[in-house]
Amino acid sequence: MARRETSTNGGGATAPGCTTETLDLHFQGRPHAIASFLLSGDGEAALIESGPGSTLTALMRGLAASGVEPELVTKILLTHIHLDHAGAAGELTELLPNAVVYVHGIGAPHLLDPSRLLRSADRIYGDQMDPLWGTMHPVPEKRLVVLEDGDVVEAAGRTLRAIYTPGHASHHVAFHDADAGVLFAGDVAGVRLPGLDRVMPPTPPPELNLELWSESINRMLALDLNTLYLTHYGPVHNVADHLDELHIRMYSWGELVLGGMRAGKSAEQLAADLEQRADDDLAATVRDPELRARFRLVSGNAMNVAGYLRYYTKRGER
């Protein structure tokens, strides 16, 4: 059974009776790696993030455990189209008959026809593609709504505004509930697993852009937030400190990779260097090797290095 963690919606002015539940999708059998957020209120439900196809069964069990009938889910809001956030969206439209999928305009074509996205992922993951991510079905065009910056979605008794937040991905949006002071932040606010007293930047290729990510962090800091909801994983309340730490670490990791590039190191050597830096960053507070393994599962250092390499190469670094 999928684990559920229930909270009120941040203590703001959202309609009475609205709730936010963190559905643990138990990615690869591990707890607290990928979350989907279930919003309930006003007689309907909405999901933020579908998770990958490999965790679809866990998601449906989580809905059932929450007493949510499939017909009640009217909206699926995606922060971006990476497989761990959006891979199950198409199949969910087959299981949730009234659900409509919302995604940024840059990502929408890849949900209508995921073949190019899947080919790219297959080159990276090879024979691990299916065990990790499962299948990805197209989203029917009539069930897809394109979002742009500032668009408003009424969902399960609350008003959510799409905040364009590129940097991790060019098609990334976060969903802001201003009444409650919360932001469903996808990956742009980093990875911070329960028990992990550090925030880490997920920096996969092909669209990492540190300048745009800095602007997105500043935009989040300008919001009156008391809570960030992270897909990896769950609520964070010390918002300003969290985002400041993320900003510092994504540049310090970048400097490590750039220095290695200039020294002629291979991608494998750079991944080992970043692995050591990440371990050093975690060592002060994390003794549990299982927790470190879970972090690597959701943000592997080989992928993070590949993102920096592509970013600096595009900028003309050698």
Image: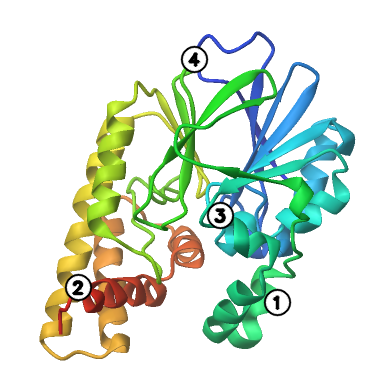
Based on the displayed image, in which of its 4 quarters is residue 257 positioned?
Answer: bottom left
Tag nearer the camera, 3 or 4 = 4
Q: Is residue 136 above or below residue 76?
A: below
Secondary element at tag 1: helix
Q: Is residue 194 visible?
A: no
- The mark that comes first in sequence, 1 or 4, is 1
The answer to which of marks 3 and 4 sits earlier in the sequence is 3
| Mark pair 3, 2: CA separation | 32 Å
4 or 2: tag closer to the N-terminus: 4
Q: Secondary structure at mark 3?
A: loop
**Which colouring convention does the figure follow?**
rainbow
User: Mark 3 against mark 2, which lies toward the viewer?
Assistant: 2
Numbered mark located on residue 33 in the image: 3
Q: Secondary structure at mark 4?
A: loop
Mark closest to the chain's N terminus, 1 or 2: 1
The residue type indicated by label 4 comes to: Asp
The residue labelled by disc 4 is 179
User: Which residue is found at the position 29% from the left and 41% from the top?
Assistant: 217
Mark 4 to mark 2: distance in Å? 40 Å
